[in-house]
Image: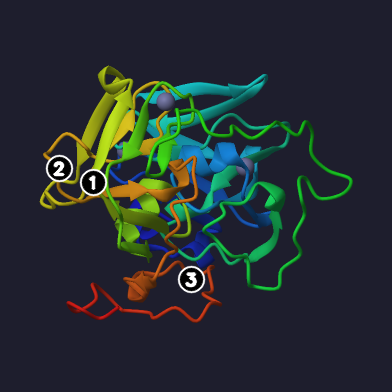
Amino acid sequence: MDANQLAGASHEETGMIEASCLCGGVEWSVEEPLGTMSHCHCARCRKAHGSAFATYVGARASGFALRAGVAIGRYASSAGGERCFCTRCAAVVPGEPDGKWIFVPAGNFHADPGVRPHSHIFAASKAPWHTIDDGLPCFDAWPPGTGGAVLEDFGVREPPGPHARGSCLCGAVGYQLTGASRRAVNCHCSRCRRARSAAFASILFAPVAYTRGQEKLASYTLPGAPRFSYAFCTVCGSALPRADQGDGLVGVPMGTLDDDPGLRPQAHIFVASKAPWYTIHDALPQFGEFPPPGAF
Ligand SMILES: [Zn+2]
Ligand SMILES: [Zn+2]
Ligand SMILES: [Zn+2]
């Protein structure tokens, strides 16, 4: 098979599944067959991805290939644990193999990886605004017989205020909602999935002010989509609200919240672009693309 044939081949023929961050600066591929896929609700995954939970799949290290046109940021989130991200778009990207296996985020696949979620892990740390309702096995931490250390959650890092507070994974950047939020959605579009490296992005719309660490922020705006813009911490790569553009409502990546904002996601949007490996089980309204005004 020559290079042109290979480029046009589907993953069924090659056994290789491509993935990338949102901006395309970091690309990787894994070889089938893949290992276990699981949803992780730990506080570090929620902050690193800015999402309700992260979904990871095991792949054989020998079949993993990484091409990085952009620098990869690395943050030591625990002793021996490293979180990697694209320094241009802040998407989570794979770290180093762990022995024979490497664990890759599922939100970035370009094609259906074939495998389906097996269980929820670290369910004891789950976000208060997210409900697990798919009937899969739930483990408080690692599944029995696997895994390693169980780290403490972060708790709330800012002094109390009238509205919910949030912070990035490393804690350098903090923010506070400065008014009530009335809208929260789960967005399944391919941009959100590749930006958050997750099944979907949970976004709450509220006025926000930073409380610390603003000098650590950078921002990313998707070319040709000026409204698809977010800030991120340059130390740890957590996506953060873009609170530098006046006092209007901004999109808050809900995984970075430290308090329960009270509001729950009210709808699933862009479900026409949903990840093939993720099934929606709740009864919230679903919209193929952007919902019409006043729809929920
Ligand atoms: Zn990128
Ligand atoms: Zn985790
Ligand atoms: Zn940070």
x, y (%) of residue 145? 89, 45
Which amino acid type is shown beneath numbered disc 3? Pro
Residue highlighted by disc 3: 276
Disc 2 target residue:
247
The first of marks 3 and 2 along the sequence is 2
For label 3, the crowd category at 10 Å Cα-Cα, with few meaning under 14, some 14 to 19 and many 20 or more, is few
Q: Is residue 136 above or below residue 67?
A: below
**Quadrant in the picture for residue 266:** bottom left
What kind of colouring is applied to the model shown? rainbow
Q: Residue at x 20, y 51 (%)?
A: 249
Confirm if mark 3 falls within 8 A of ligand 1: no
State if disc 2 and disc 1 touch (CB < 8 Å).
yes
Amino acid type at mark 1: Pro
Task: Tell me: residue 135, above or below residue 184.
Answer: below
Residue on which the image places disc 1: 207
Quadrant of the rendered structure where residue 100 is?
Answer: top right
Q: Up-down: is 22 above or below 80?
A: below
Residue 205 percent location from the top left of the image:
28, 55
Secondary structure of residue under mark 3: loop
Q: Amino acid at mark 2?
A: Asp
Real-space CA distance between mark 3 and mark 1, rounded to the nearest whole angstrom: 33 Å
